[in-house]
């Protein structure tokens, strides 16, 4: 694909099944880092991954050969498998069925990064319903 330029930034969000608070502060950094690794494994760039006990936000840059539904499948499926293997007490963990997926223009990426940091670190830990409405 000579002379082709793409910039596909996607903001994904999905919750734990029944919005149960599985992702505790003790493990969240490891979970977010692992999800970043999933993106790399599948030739994407995780720009920012984070969330709270009952949901996740992931801002990723993806090549045009990967459909958004496939990205969500990678992030959710691979992380769920790892969580089950890594944390023996979390065998009942599941992500919700479905996800929210939004495109983000390149010019809006810095704003999206700031919004994610503000919602997690400054204004407190938002519930999923409140968080998804702010996307």
Image (spheres, rainbow, N blue to C red):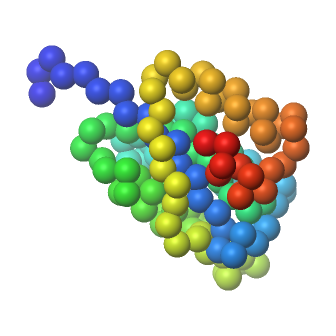
- Residue 50, located in which quarter of the rendered image? top right
- Residue at x 50%, y 66% (from the top left corner): 98
Image location (x, y in percent) of residue 85: 61, 72
Q: How many marks?
A: 0
| Residue found at x 55% / y 33% | 47
Tell whether 11 sits left or right of 24.
left
Q: Which quadrant holds the N terminus?
A: top left
In this view of the protein, which residue sits in the foreground, 101 or 70? 101
Point out the residue furthest to the front here.
133
Can residue 32 be seen here? The reply is: no
Query: Which quadrant is the C terminus positioned in?
Result: top right
Q: Please give left or right for residue 8 compared with residue 50 in the image.
A: left
Left or right: 11 with respect to 135?
A: left
* Near-viewer residue (92 or 102): 102
Q: Residue at x 52, y 55 (%)?
A: 100
Position in image of residue 113 (x %, y %)? 64, 29
Residue 16 can be seen, yes or no: yes
Q: Where is residue 30? Give x, y as percent.
A: 70, 52
Question: What residue lies at 25% left-to-right and 22% top-to-bottom?
Answer: 5
Extreme-bottom residue of the structure: 92
32 shown above or below 20: above
Q: Is residue 110 above or below residue 104?
A: above
* Residue 48: image location, x then y, percent: 60, 36
Residue 91 figure quarter: bottom right
- Classify 82 as above or below 30: below
């Amino acid at each position: 694909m000579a002379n082709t330029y793409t910039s596909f930034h996607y903001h994904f969000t999905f919750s734990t099944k029944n919005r149960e608070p599985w992702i505790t502060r003790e493990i969240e950094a490891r979970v977010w880092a692992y999800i970043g690794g999933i993106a790399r494994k599948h030739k994407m760039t995780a720009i920012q991954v984070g969330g709270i006990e009952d949901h996740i936000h992931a801002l990723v840059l993806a090549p045009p050969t990967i459909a958004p539904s496939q990205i969500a499948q990678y992030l959710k499926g691979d992380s769920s498998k790892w969580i089950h293997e890594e944390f023996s007490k979390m065998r009942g963990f599941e992500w919700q069925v479905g996800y929210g997926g939004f495109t983000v223009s390149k010019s809006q990426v810095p704003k999206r990064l700031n919004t994610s940091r503000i919602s997690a670190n400054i204004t407190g830990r938002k519930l999923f319903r409140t968080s998804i409405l702010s996307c």
